Amino acid sequence: MYIEQIEKSLYELICETSTNLPKDVRRKIRAAKEQEDAGTRAAMSLDTIAQNINMADEKISPICQDTGLPTFKIKTPVGVNQLEIKAAIKRAIVQATKDAKLRPNSVDSLTGDNSGDNLGEGVPVVKFEQWEQDHIEVKLILKGGGCENKNIQYSLPTELEGLGRAGRDLDGIRKCILHSVYQAQGQGCSAGFIGVGIGGDRSSGYDLAKEQLFREVDDVNPHAQLAELEDYILDTANKLGIGTMGFGGEATLLGCKVGVMHRIPASFYVSVAYNCWAYRRMAVDIDAKTGEITNWHYNDGEKIAFAQQAEQQDEKKSTSRTVELKAPITEEQIRDLKVGDVVKISGRIYTGRDAIHKHLMENDSPVDLDGQIIYHCGPVVAKDEDGNYEIKAAGPTTSAREEPYQGDIMKKFGVRAVIGKGGMGPKTLAALEEHGGVYLNAIGGAAQYYADCIKAVEGVDLLEFGIPEAMWHLRVEDFTAVVTMDSHGNSLHADVDKSSLEKLAQFKEKVYS
């Protein structure tokens, strides 16, 4: 009975972490919303984020379709059987995946096969530590691939774009942390949170950085120099103008936590773990005798519900032009679109991620893509009682991974529009101008908001690639995104990158005590 209750408690922790943002994170997002001027792209993005948080809570569905790599950090009293707990974690993970609280995310690195149940070699990550308390503490973080890919590690001394030489001192550390925020741009679903590990080796430094993400957002670092550094980074990062989703704006970073450990003389690492706004981490205390949850962490203070705020924001009209699109789209329609336009899509769109893009480079498409829209998305999918597919979560994935393929595929198959997040690079921009295409930026992490726009699954191809990587045929209504790269050579992402680099250079010299 004890281990069965442990499993139930772990399942509850997994579901809560995936579907319900902690109170401290909600408060930070509300503060960010209050900073932005109504009608801006940043304000629209934050309003969508707020609606998404509320919808996930109400539906008990994943906040973001990328439920990440589950990482557990567990402290147990002496005598507790850690093997039994690890086995219970795996069973809870499998059940949560079956119940569409987690997307199947475990992929064999050699074959590319998806296990389908979130289990595999090294997955999930489970780390144990013994302590002298009489209860079990379980921490869980679900960190998606978009923000995980923006993690970065620096070896000091080094040269940094915009900031110059970063030496082996506190000022060099300062420069590295600022640069880590700049290089993430909107690809990590800003406004984000960062954990920083100073020292250690390459692996322990990253582990220390991720450990900082379990701290309370509003806590104060007991180390005076680090507390000052955290405040400085948070204030300065929000002067870079990167903003929510990289659209520009006031809110670029919502939290910065820094830890330090010793190192060997030859190595000096600064490791940064970047986390998106969908900051999914929870922790519980479990009775070591009964297996029941006795306490939830991050539970102090007010829990912000965003429904009323979202309704108020809807009344404030955006100054951007709104254009309705339905595929197949003509080149003339695409040439009419400009960066900053808001697009509302109805009709059919097709999902396509890494495996699909690689496949299309080497093979014919299973469907006619001429004039069509590709959505960079790996949804959470369930089957209803009649065996029909249902989309449970469907936000955009980071588009930059498709940069080697995208322009060629658009020209090869006649694709007119691509939806994703974080923007794409010069090769794609050139192809958009040559071919007559457009890049549409959806709001990263807003998986419930976009799932609500999906009215039916009308087919699926290449399901052998796994649920996230298959080509899903989706019928949508009023699917909203922003034109951030147009067919006239304009890129909001390139503009924000350039302006934020110029602002970053203003902080080349040490400006805090």
Image: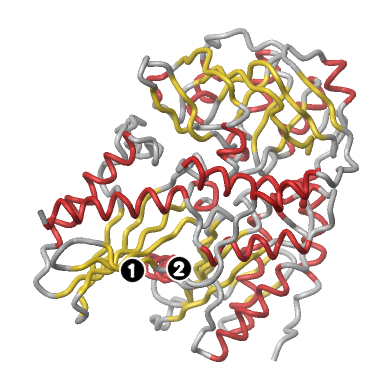
**Identity of the residue drawn at 69% across and 10% down:** 370
Q: Residues within 10 Å of mark 2 (few under 14, many from 20)?
A: few
Residue topped by disc 1:
295
Residue topped by disc 2:
299
Question: Residue 265, relative to residue 372: is it above or below?
Answer: below
| Horizontal arrangement in the rendering, residue 207 relative to residue 373 (left or right) | left
Q: How is the image coloured?
A: secondary structure
Question: Residue 253, position in %: x, y?
Answer: 66, 64
**Identity of the residue drawn at 55% across and 32% down:** 377
Q: Residues within 10 Å of mark 1 (few under 14, many from 20)?
A: few
Question: Residue 460, relative to residue 215: is it above or below?
Answer: above
- Outermost residue on the front side: it is 308
Question: Residue 68, position in %: x, y?
Answer: 43, 47
Question: Residue 403, position in %: x, y?
Answer: 63, 35
Question: Residue 81, relative to residue 374: is it above or below?
Answer: below
| Horizontal arrangement in the rendering, residue 254 relative to residue 38 (left or right) | left
Mark 2–mark 1 contact, CB under 8 Å?
Answer: yes
**Identity of the residue drawn at 25% across and 66% down:** 286
**Identity of the residue drawn at 81% across and 21% down:** 436
Question: Residue 169, position in %: x, y?
Answer: 58, 85
**Nearest to the observer: residue 504 or residue 451:** 451
**Mark 2–mark 1 distance (CA, rounded to whole Å):** 9 Å
Question: Please, what is the three-letter code of the amino acid marked with disc 1?
Answer: Asn
